[in-house]
């Protein structure tokens, strides 16, 4: 049963198309939102008969709000989760306090969903990786392609050795969040292969 649950997660991660449909006219870049990801994933969740739940934990340290969001998929028996945290900025021009908190919650939720569905936001302008990419020479194979190829390959790996070789290459050529996502896929598939024994 658990194997079928994880197969559904891989199917959603493979088929999800959550385009960057919002436009930041000030900074001149496209980006995706939490709402956009949820809108794109709902038909896939319905098809795979999975439910999603997002929980937020808000703490107040000093004069700043910190938000930890946890996105969880479930079939009623098994669960799969990803978390993300964000800190409320001290101030943002044109925002009142409630808007700042709301924006921080939305940001934390978006990145929890990114982790849950293996969405690559490396080229989003609100990540550190984006500014580093703008300054660096483009590479032939993007981190997104490496992660996608590894995820697809891991789904079809028939042995632990095959999975391990593929993971080594991906992990060596990825960094930061991409490495974390690759490790999640690796752990998931490794668990499935061990259950086959």
Image (tube, grey):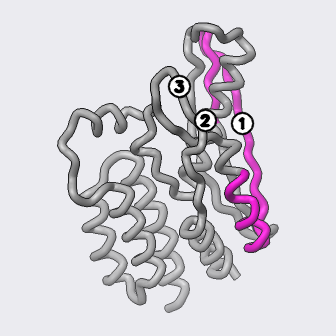
Disc 3 crowd rating (10 Å Cα; few below 14, some 14-19, many 20+) is few
For disc 2, the marked residue is 108
Q: Decide if residue 184 is on the left or right side of residue 134.
A: right
The residue at the point 62 percent across, 81 percent down is 3
Q: Decide if residue 5 is on the left or right side of residue 21.
A: right
Q: Hey, which quadrant is residue 94 in on the image?
A: top right
> Residue 185 got which mark?
none
> Residue 25 got which mark?
3
Give whichever of discs 1 and 2 has the lower sequence position: 1
The residues tagged by marks 1 and 2 sit, at their Cα atoms, a distance apart of: 9 Å
Pointers 1 and 2 in contact (C-beta within 8 Å): yes
Spot occupied by residue 151 in the image (x, y as percentages of width and height): 44, 70
Q: Name the quarter where the N terminus is drawn.
A: bottom right
The residue at the point 58 percent across, 42 percent down is 32
Give whichever of discs 3 and 2 has the lower sequence position: 3
What segment carries the magenta color? 39-68
Above or below, comparing residue 60 to residue 106 in the picture: above
Query: Is residue 172 at least partly visible in the picture?
Result: no
Pointers 3 and 2 in contact (C-beta within 8 Å): no
């Amino acid at each position: 049963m658990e194997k079928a649950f994880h197969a559904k997660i891989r199917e959603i991660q493979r088929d999800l198309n959550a385009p960057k449909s919002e436009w930041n006219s000030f900074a001149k870049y496209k980006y995706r939102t939490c709402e956009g990801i949820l809108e794109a994933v709902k038909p896939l969740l319905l098809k795979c008969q999975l439910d999603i739940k997002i929980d937020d934990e808000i703490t107040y340290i000093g004069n700043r709000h910190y938000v930890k969001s946890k996105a969880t998929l479930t079939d009623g028996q098994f669960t799969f989760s990803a978390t993300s945290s964000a800190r409320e900025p001290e101030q943002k021009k044109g925002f009142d306090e409630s808007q700042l908190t709301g924006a921080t919650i939305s940001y934390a939720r978006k990145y929890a969903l990114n982790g849950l569905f293996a969405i690559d936001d490396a080229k989003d302008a609100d990540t550190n990786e984006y500014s580093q990419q703008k300054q660096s020479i483009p590479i032939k194979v993007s981190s997104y392609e490496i992660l996608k190829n590894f995820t697809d390959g891991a789904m079809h790996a028939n042995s632990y050795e095959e999975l391990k070789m593929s993971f080594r290459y991906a992990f060596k050529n990825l960094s930061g969040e991409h490495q974390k996502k690759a490790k999640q896929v690796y752990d998931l598939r490794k668990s499935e292969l061990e259950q086959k024994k």
